[in-house]
Image: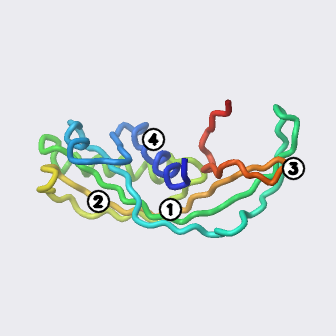
């Protein structure tokens, strides 16, 4: 999973866990399936800092493998689009209530490697294309990733968003 996909998945999962439906990719058909407000998470822009060699953070002993792993980090700045859609039956109030919940999620319930810098909500409007109420936002984040490599090799593992639990098979 790419870095941006990890960030979008972390945000989508956190919003869903807070009780608001959330999707990463959406279309009119997808949105119309929901009888409540739904958050659509997308990417506006992204820049990776330290794009060359990753920054060395230190070592970690892996007791399971009996080896020392070197840990490297990378920081990314990105801006995500967040669009809330609500059917007519839920109304503009449904968008605003979902925005309150989503704002709380973005401020308190994300993995430790994902830090919100700024959130800007627009105002609720009727979207004629989708036939739903729409409330858009832009959220600016700093995302921190780590990767590991065994001392005897130079190969990195994939960079993983800090604070996200990984399944190792």
The answer for how far apart the CA atoms under marks 2 and 4 are is: 19 Å
Return the mark for residue 141: 1
Return the mark for residue 13: 4
The answer for how far apart the CA atoms under marks 4 and 3 are is: 34 Å
Give me the residue at 52% from left, 48% from top: 110
Identify the mark nearer the N-term, 4 or 3.
4
The answer for how far apart the CA atoms under marks 2 and 3 are is: 47 Å
According to the picture, the residue beneath numbered tag 3 turns out to be 151
The answer for how far apart the CA atoms under marks 1 and 3 are is: 32 Å
Q: Locate residue 127 relative to residue 23 in the image: left or right.
A: left
Residue 20 location (% of width, % of height)? 34, 40
The picture quadrant where one finds residue 168 is top right
Secondary structure state at the residue bearing disc 4 = helix
Q: Residues within 10 Å of mark 4 (few under 14, many from 20)?
A: some
Identify the mark nearer the N-term, 2 or 4.
4
Q: Locate residue 79 relative to residue 51 in the image: left or right.
A: left
Identify the mark nearer the N-term, 1 or 3.
1
The answer for how far apart the CA atoms under marks 1 and 4 are is: 16 Å
Q: Residue 79 or 47: which is nearer the viewer?
A: 47
According to the picture, the residue beneath numbered tag 2 turns out to be 136
Give me the residue at 41% from left, 43% from top: 15
Mark 2 vs 4: CB contact within 8 A: no
The answer for how far apart the CA atoms under marks 2 and 1 are is: 16 Å
Secondary structure state at the residue bearing disc 2 = strand
Mark 2 vs 1: CB contact within 8 A: no
Q: Residues within 10 Å of mark 2 (few under 14, many from 20)?
A: some
Q: Residue 157 or 100: which is nearer the viewer?
A: 157
Secondary structure state at the residue bearing disc 1 = strand
């Amino acid at each position: 999973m790419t870095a941006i996909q990890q960030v979008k998945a972390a945000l989508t999962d956190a919003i869903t866990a807070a009780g608001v439906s959330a999707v990463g990719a959406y279309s009119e058909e997808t949105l119309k399936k929901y009888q409540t407000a739904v958050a659509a998470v997308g990417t506006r822009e992204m820049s990776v800092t330290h794009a060359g060699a990753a920054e060395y953070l230190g070592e970690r002993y892996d007791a399971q493998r009996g080896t020392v792993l070197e840990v490297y980090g990378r920081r990314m700045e990105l801006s995500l689009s967040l669009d809330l859609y609500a059917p007519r039956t839920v109304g503009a109030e449904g968008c605003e209530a979902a925005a309150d919940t989503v704002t709380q999620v973005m401020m308190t319930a994300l993995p430790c490697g994902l830090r919100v810098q700024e959130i800007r909500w627009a105002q609720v409007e009727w979207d004629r294309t989708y036939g739903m109420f729409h409330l858009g936002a832009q959220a600016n984040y700093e995302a921190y990733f780590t990767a590991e490599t065994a001392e005897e090799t130079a190969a990195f593992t994939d960079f993983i968003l800090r604070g996200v639990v990984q399944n190792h098979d």
